[in-house]
Amino acid sequence: MTQLTPARVHRCRDCDGFPTVHIDTGARHRDGTRRTTPVTCRACNGTGTVLVHPSSSASVGR
């Protein structure tokens, strides 16, 4: 029987895997489309994932 191996990478807690979002500024371009600004998650630096440290994953089940 096979065993599952724990994931070495987890989704970021702060952005929940959505590292870059575009926020509406309220302004519009001349053609009528909305002006947005991109914002990147500071916790994961825009990757959407965080590395699981071996020491922290070993203590989770105890």
Image (tube, rainbow, N blue to C red):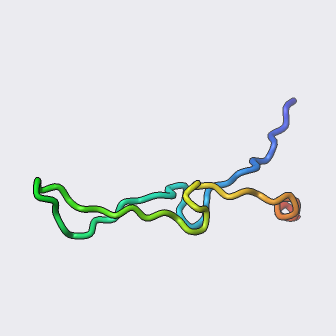
Q: Residue furthest top?
A: 1
Q: Front-most of 14 and 1? A: 14
Q: Name the quadrant containing residue 12.
A: bottom right
Q: Residue at x 81, y 42 (%)?
A: 5
Q: How many numbered discs sit on the rendered protein?
A: 0
Q: Position of residue 10 (x, y in %)?
A: 67, 54
Q: Residue at x 36, y 60 (%)?
A: 22
Q: Front-most of 28 and 3? A: 28
Q: Position of residue 55 (x, y in %)?
A: 88, 63
Q: Residue at x 29, y 62 (%)?
A: 36
Q: Is residue 53 above or below residue 2?
A: below
Q: Position of residue 56 (x, y in %)?
A: 83, 64
Q: Front-most of 56 and 25? A: 25
Q: Is residue 53 above or below residue 4?
A: below
Quadrant position of the N terminus in the picture: top right
Q: Position of residue 51 (x, y in %)?
A: 73, 56
Q: Name the quadrant containing residue 11.
A: bottom right
27 left or right, relative to 5: left
Q: Residue furthest front?
A: 30
21 left or right, relative to 47: left
Quadrant position of the C terminus in the picture: bottom right
